[in-house]
Amino acid sequence: MTDYTTPIEATFELQRQAVEGSHQALQQSVEFQQRLNEATLDSLEATESTQRKVVELQQEAFHTVLDAWEANIPGAAGATDELRELVDESYDELLETHSDAFDTFLTEYEGGIDTQSELSDEFLAALEEQYDLLLDAHEEIETQSVEATAQVGEQVDELQDQIEDVQAQIRDVSEQAADAIEA
């Protein structure tokens, strides 16, 4: 008996592997985006810290200049004290504004990440459900196709057996007829 179902089963297996590969690629893509968002957030936090340090270093450099003035210019101490106070107030205000701006931005960005993460999780859950339904339907179609092909294969085998029987009978009748003619 010829196995008519093997190519069909192999085809369905290849289709299943392609669907599984696509499913995994999509899941990994969404997970990568989530990791990328978290890395970006970490990077932004590091950027804020670095920028704060640069501003503080600029303030210290300005103090160093004022210290040099006081040391080299007689009577500059009173003027530099006022200037130092004005510089400190300006830098304090800049640092506070900088901190508030980054806090607001990071809060909004984190909220966006959380929202995207929730949507991604819902998407992946829906995708998983659809994937399961697709595989169930695929398996059902495979089962029906294999059964139908097996039935057709059995019918072809039966037909082939019948043809062989008819051919054998024709040969027998032909041989009998030839023998009768010769006799």
Image (cartoon, helix red, strand yellow):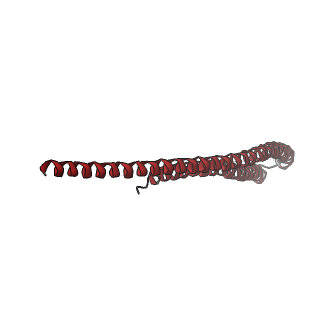
Left or right of 134 on screen, residue 172: left
Q: Say if residue 155 shows up in the picture.
A: yes
The quadrant of the rendering that contains the N terminus is bottom left
Residue nearer the viewer, 67 or 123: 123
The location of residue 132, given as percent across then percent down, is: 67, 50
The location of residue 33, given as percent across then percent down, is: 66, 48
- The residue most toward the bottom is 1
The location of residue 36, given as percent across then percent down, is: 66, 50
How many numbered marks appear? 0
Residue nearer the viewer, 175 or 70: 175
Residue at 26 percent of width and 52 percent of height: 172
Q: Say if residue 19 shows up in the picture.
A: no
Left or right of 30 on screen, residue 76: right
- The residue most toward the front is 183
Residue nearer the viewer, 35 or 93: 35
- Residue 104 quadrant: top right
The location of residue 114, given as percent across then percent down, is: 78, 47
Residue nearer the viewer, 155 or 92: 155
Residue at 84 percent of width and 50 percent of height: 77
Left or right of 41 on screen, residue 101: right
